[in-house]
Amino acid sequence: MELISALLVQVSQMMLVLLAAPLLTGFIRKVKARLQRRRGPPIVQPYRDILRLLKKEVVVADNASWIFRVAPYLIFAATWVAAALVPTFAKGLLFSWSADLIAIIALLASARFFLALAGMDIGTAFGGIGASREMMIASLAEPAMLLVVFTMALVAHSTQLSAVADLFALGVGLRVSLGLAMVGLIIVAIAENGRVPVDNPATHLELTMVHEAMVLEYSGRHLAMIELAAAVKLLLYISLIGCIFVPWTLAAPSASTASHLTGFAGYLAKLTVFGFLLGVFETAIAKMRVFRLPDFVGAALMLGLLGTLLLFVSRSL
């Protein structure tokens, strides 16, 4: 009976991240529209867009290889699995043993690799430009993410997410290193998801595109998979920030139904707050030039490195 209950909770989390991701994207768009004194599209518009794309016919270039056709499904699968491993409303789930931060980074890196490969597969100029820019950002974002993980692992003595959440929920005090890690993680989240000021997901200007340039040749269900994967990836990073730095509403493994419902309500509150803050931030700041992106993402690398060094220095004193 306990195994069935744990399996139901795990499946509920997997479906939650899949169903809530488009809603989060729609909420952020709505917040930005309201701040710009526009009505904006309805919050459920991303669902409509994905359903419409699923019904459309797929148009594939003649010189496209099997990589171009398979990449959307691999990208979606890797992103969904990574998002399902991050605790949302409960911790210590059935598959929590595999919810390792380094494994999640590896899954996201795999999805990025296939996206860049698909962007270069057809041989268009936009796809090559977008892939090169994506790899340039990733070359700084991935080491920064690893340093952030090492900073938290030195405090929690583990890279397993449930263990980190358990320790941080009990309280670890005010640590400068964790503050630096949090800021670095936020910068990485903005860069990895192609949000302002790194990229603008609402524009298709040739000189500024990063993510959109790699998916210009996709249509139909292939584009739907990529758009849904992008929404799930944004939800993943917000869930990761909430799980590590705001872990107090997570239900215990053997908690009651009321505790799981409380964790669910707390998770929705986290998504609402972080989504609103992201909408305000993107409205208040302008997009950076492409040549300034290494400075922005490199700041996360330096913050992660500084946080790790501070922990080593403080322990040696």
Image: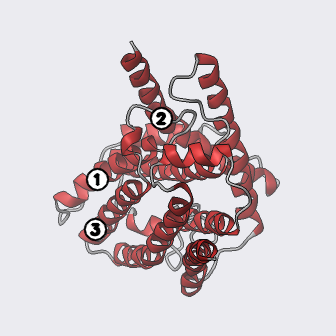
In front: 83, or 227? 83
Which part of the image, by quadrant, shows the N terminus? Answer: top left
Sequence-first tag of 2 and 1:
1
The answer to whether residue 182 is left or right of residue 150 is: right
| Distance between the alpha carbons at the discs numbered 3 and 2 | 35 Å
What residue type is disc 2 on? Gly
Name which residue lies at 43% across and 18% down. 5
Q: CA distance from mark 2 to mark 1?
A: 43 Å
Label 2: few (<14), some (14–19) or many (≥20) C-alpha neighbours in 10 Å: many
Q: Is residue 164 above or below residue 210?
A: above
Q: Which residue is mark 3?
A: 117
Mark found first going from the N terminus, 3 or 1: 1
Query: Dot 3 surroundings within 10 Å: few (below 14), some, or many (20 or more)?
Result: some
Q: Which label was assigned to residue 59?
A: 1
The outermost residue toward the top is 1
Residue beneath label 2, please?
92
**Mark 1 residue type:** Val
Residue 41 seen in the current view:
no
